[in-house]
Image: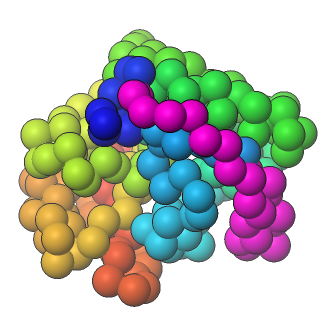
């Protein structure tokens, strides 16, 4: 079976449905096999949702959105903001579109494509991602190194990682790319890291 980080995940198609309550927001999720953490919200994303910085009016990118939970919560926290959700997995894109509609989110859209490809020449106040750590360091490094060109002045890249399983190295890369870095929060072995570009 192919990895969820692929255009067309193989294997049988099984549907799942669950609810998530985070930061006072309840979200209904329709999911399916072939996407990351299909049956329930994974711990890393849960930690990211609790610590991510979202401000109303911001233009935001949910990079590698999966079934769309990060983008949905960000859009609900910032009703005057706008979120673009992207993923290379076409099944994830289909599910994210369905979940935006299911949760009546109107200040967001979903685009298909690899990493930053779908938002070429666009900039954001923040990029938020639970990066696909299982794909290896090369992809993760690209996410960090290429992020500044898609961020506005004072823009922030925010991501979650298991600190003892690659996260420490990712924070080092982040520190080499961004002039300001910090850990926004940590829980259950996961940390939410942020890198801010200069003004």
Q: How is the image coloured?
A: rainbow
Residue pictured at 35% horizontal, 75% vertical:
191
Quadrant containing the N terminus in the rendered view: top left
Question: What range is drawn magenta here?
Answer: 9-29
Residue pictured at 43% horizontal, 79% vertical:
185
Q: Is residue 124 left or right of residue 84?
A: left
The stretch drawn in magenta includes residue 142: no
Task: Please state the horizontal and vertical placement of residue 175, each as a whole percent of the image.
Answer: 16, 60
Q: Which residue is situated farthest in the right direction here?
A: 104
**Residue 81: which quarter of the image?**
top right
Quadrant containing the C terminus in the rendered view: top left
Task: Please state the horizontal and vertical placement of residue 98, each as a whole percent of the image.
Answer: 76, 32
**Residue 20: which quarter of the image?**
bottom right
Q: Main secondary structure of the magenta part?
A: strand
Question: Which of 165 and 60 lies nearest the eye of the viewer?
Answer: 165
Residue pictured at 33% horizontal, 28% vertical:
6
Task: Please state the horizontal and vertical placement of residue 178, each as a whole percent of the image.
Answer: 22, 51
Q: Is residue 172 above or below residue 98?
A: below
Q: Is residue 22 left or right of residue 36?
A: right
Q: Which residue is situated farthest in the bottom direction here?
A: 188
Residue pictured at 59% horizontal, 58% vertical:
39
Report if residue 22 is visible in the image: yes
Task: Please state the horizontal and vertical placement of residue 157, each as a whole percent of the image.
Answer: 38, 49
The stretch drawn in magenta includes residue 17: yes
Question: Which of 177 and 49 lies nearest the eye of the viewer?
Answer: 49
Q: Is residue 165 left or right of residue 12?
A: left
Instruction: State how many labels appear.
Output: 0
Q: Which residue is situated farthest in the front direction here?
A: 12
Question: Which of 7 and 192 lies nearest the eye of the viewer?
Answer: 7
Report if residue 123 is visible in the image: no
Q: Is residue 180 above or below residue 198?
A: below
């Amino acid at each position: 079976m192919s990895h969820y980080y692929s255009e067309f995940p193989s294997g049988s198609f099984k549907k799942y449905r669950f609810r998530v309550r985070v930061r006072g927001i309840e979200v209904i999720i329709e999911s399916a096999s072939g996407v990351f953490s299909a049956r329930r919200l994974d711990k890393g994303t849960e930690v990211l949702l609790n610590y991510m910085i979202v401000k109303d009016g911001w233009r935001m990118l949910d990079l590698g959105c999966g079934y769309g939970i990060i983008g949905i919560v960000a859009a609900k926290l910032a009703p005057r903001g706008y979120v673009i959700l992207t993923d290379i997995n076409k099944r994830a894109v289909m599910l994210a579109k369905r979940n935006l509609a299911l949760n009546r989110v109107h200040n967001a859209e979903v685009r298909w494509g690899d990493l930053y490809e779908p938002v070429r020449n666009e900039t954001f106040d923040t990029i938020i991602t639970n990066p696909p750590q299982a794909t290896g360091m090369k992809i993760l490094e690209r996410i960090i190194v290429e992020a500044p060109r898609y961020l506005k002045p004072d823009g922030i890249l925010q991501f979650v990682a298991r600190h003892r399983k690659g996260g420490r190295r990712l924070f080092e890369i982040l520190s080499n790319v961004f002039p300001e870095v910090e850990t926004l929060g940590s829980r259950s072995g996961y940390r939410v890291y942020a890198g801010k570009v200069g003004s």
